[in-house]
Image (cartoon, rainbow, N blue to C red):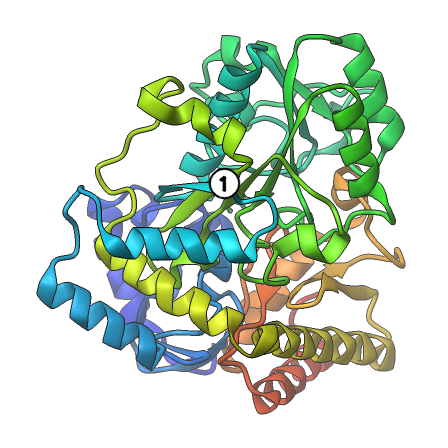
Amino acid sequence: MANSTERSKELFERALRVLVEGGSSPSRGPANYGEYPLFIERGEGAWIWDVDGNRYIDWMMAYGALPLGHAHPLIVEALTEAASTGTLFAAATEVEVEVAELISGLVPGAEKVRFANTGTEATMAAIRLARGYTGRPRFIKFEGHYHGWYDDYLVSAHPQPTVVFGHPNDPVKIPDSSGLNRKALEDTIVVPWNDLEAIERAISNYRGSIAAVITEGIMANIGVIPPGEDYLQGLREITRANDILLILDETVTGCRIARGGCQELFDVDADIVTMGKGLGAGFPVAAFAGRAEIMEALAWGGVLHYGTQNASRAGMFAARVNLTELAKDDGAAFTRLWEVGEKFTSGLNQIFSETGTSAIAQGVGPMLQIFFTDRPEITDFRDFCTHVDRGRYQRFALSLFAHGVYMTPSSALHSVASLAHTDEDVAVTLEAVRLVLQSGMEE
Ligand SMILES: Cc1ncc(COP(=O)(O)O)c(C=O)c1O
């Protein structure tokens, strides 16, 4: 690296003595960052600084949790107020009603809302709700979709060698962790995405026992893979015809792709929607929402969902500012997020073609990922695992650090535009990409 990162290195050695892998999640450790990760000290707008004082344009943005960027003045103001008047009461507050009203106004079908803290909590509660409401045990999840780390759906989510997939008509369920309750997976049906015949086949195999289908609206944990044309509508029609609930996991796409998320963008309606990441603008705020009739199954703890930290006042203060900013001026924020994302994506593709690099930038509006591949597009999990050079991407992303650009080093994750990114940030990033590719550092 051109810049010194000695202090990060020292901190990592110290961290290894007290933290597993020197951090708090495997995605922050050596698997993605190699020898040692950069320790980040400060963020402002689109920039972050590491502990050695190096500055980076941040395209990871806490995996999309920061639509307004780092330390947005309105968020700072709201949090200062919350900090001085009470951050958590674990009791009813006015601001939680306001935030629920904002969500209800923005997200189609969100008649009733329940707050949680993380995307994992929201999706696991949504699955329990669907089972409780329908009285059926099974649910369908898709290959390559990640919904969090709860046992029931922690299967066939991570990239794997292709030999273990099994036939697409009967995919092998690949557990993503040791220690899972194997019985939990008995009621989980795994199906390839972007394939309506596959879902029809699974439904007819397990007729009458399926509570819900859970899906990401845009695949965001295997790079970025959009749904095929009319795929989500097809999924909606099939689930409705079979009286199965559709759970749309908008943990990534909510507060990012459109005011109404993927429901609005793809003109599809879900029974239950989950949100997280971008909702709290940097605070752990998540939610699940849907038709009142379904959500009411939670009442009196019928389908139980608790949480001391649910709807913390501080988190709600942040979410209120965030949603208000994102919704104002007829959703102009989303026009801007798309503008930045598309400029970035098309700029990357132009550089790949000019430098003769076998790579594509693939995305939907503000979300994008670079795939080192010979393919013109990547359309599903199996495609990704078979045709994407993940090691090369990792070397590429790590090489960008020395040029002041911070992208996730995991090819299964993605870059996101925020409202803090400027056209200049895009231009500087593209120049850095060109330099790295010309130097062949990533090969
Ligand atoms: C689509 C999706 N759902 C759920 C989750 C889990 O969210 P959290 O990390 O907040 O538990 C993630 C996290 O990456 C996600 O991408």
Q: Nearer the viewer, residue 58 or 364?
A: 364
Check the picture and name the quadrant holding the C terminus: bottom right
In this rendering, position of residue 387 left or right of residue 244: right
Q: Nearer the viewer, residue 26 or 203?
A: 203
Can you give x and y, in whole percent of width and height, for residue 183 in the image?
51, 8
Characterize the local packing of mark 1: few (<14), some (14-19) or many (20 or more) Cα atoms within 10 angstroms: many
From the viewer's perspective, is residue 311 above or below residue 146?
A: below
Residue positioned 67% across, 37% down in the render: 144
Query: Is the CB atom of the residue marked by disc 1 within 8 angstroms of ligand 1's nearest atom?
Result: no
From the viewer's perspective, is residue 349 above or below residue 371?
A: below
Q: Amino acid at mark 1?
A: Ala
From the viewer's perspective, is residue 118 above or below residue 198?
A: below
The kind of secondary structure element at disc 1 is strand
Can you give x and y, in whole percent of width and height, for residue 424 in the image?
59, 91
In this rendering, position of residue 37 left or right of residue 427: left
Can you give x and y, in whole percent of width and height, for residue 310 in the image?
29, 42
Residue positioned 60% across, 75% down in the render: 330
Residue positioned 38% across, 56% down in the render: 99
Can you give x and y, in whole percent of width and height, for residue 278 in the image?
47, 59
Q: Which residue is mark 1?
A: 289
Residue lying farthest bottom?
A: 424
